[in-house]
Image (cartoon, helix red, strand yellow):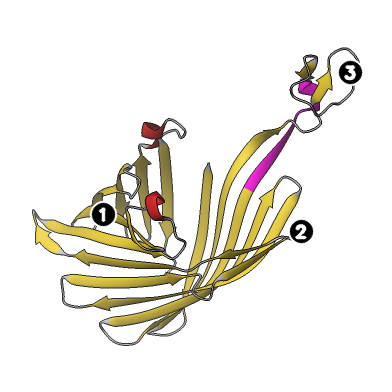
Amino acid sequence: LNYDFASVGFPMSNNTALGISMIRLASDDNYDTRGALIDVNSGQVIHDINNPNARIDPSRVKLFSTADWAIFTSYAFQFSDVLSFGGNVKLLRRENAEYNAFGVGFDIGARYRASEQFILGANFQDVTTTFVSWNTGRNELITPTLKLGSAYLLDALGGQFAPALDVDIRFENRRSASNFNLGSMSFDVHSGMEYLYKNMLALRAGYSEVGVLTYGGGIRLTKFAVDYSFSQYNVFEQFENTHRISLIISFQ
């Protein structure tokens, strides 16, 4: 899988900001064998895989991508020194070979600093239920997801530790597919830790709801920051290890 993300933010005033972001999550260069199954004797295209004369003609195999695109326009407002709100409008596009879909959704969020050390956050994704329409005439609904998170800042060893814990609450009747559930409501838990030294060097580790360990680090300078993370997905055999690199540039 390929995951690409780009974003730019603009301060509008002392307590407001506007952002524009784009995400692409895709599986590229997939083999499309439709129309590539032939009768080895006649060379004609057939559709019966159980035909003893059936063979795949490599010259007829095509490549295609399956991709999800999302473009966000976000607005954030700092209500007070301890409370901030935000929201976005997102345009969605899904592509699967010759099929595609379009959708519109909304997210809202809030951040509350309960004390100098303790921070709480909430993010309600697809808050109104996101409608996705395919060019085949089929329609889909993306149900809301409520994300609740917390972090505690602790000064130690010449830097700052930030253990974090959050939970994803979904309403899709996922049951055994989640960490635990109450009826149709499911809960998936994530945890992590960051150590930031001199507000410049960072070390991170995390644990996802599917049992994947992640590690990473970063460096912050005056005008830019670079971060790296590693996820050990190969424990599931279906996925290879994942490396992510991000770059942040400040123009202030």
Q: Is residue 61 left or right of residue 43?
A: left
Q: Disc 3 or 2, which lies upstream in sequence?
A: 3
Q: CA distance from mark 1 to mark 3?
A: 56 Å
- Where is residue 10 drawn, in percent x and y? 48, 74
State which mark lies toward you, 1 or 3: 3
**Residue segment shown in magenta:** 56-66
SS at badge 1 = strand
Q: Position of residue 195 (x, y in %)?
A: 19, 53
Residue 43, disc? 3
Q: Secondary structure at mark 3?
A: loop
Q: Residues within 10 Å of mark 2 (few under 14, many from 20)?
A: few
**Image vertical order of residue 14 relative to residue 227, above or below:** below
Residue at left offset 42%, top offset 58%: 248
- Please say whether residue 61 is one of the residues in the magenta stretch: yes
Kind of residue indicated by mark 2? Asn
Q: Which mark is residue 191?
A: 1
In the rendered image, which residue does mark 2 sit on? 135
Q: Is residue 226 left or right of residue 21?
A: left
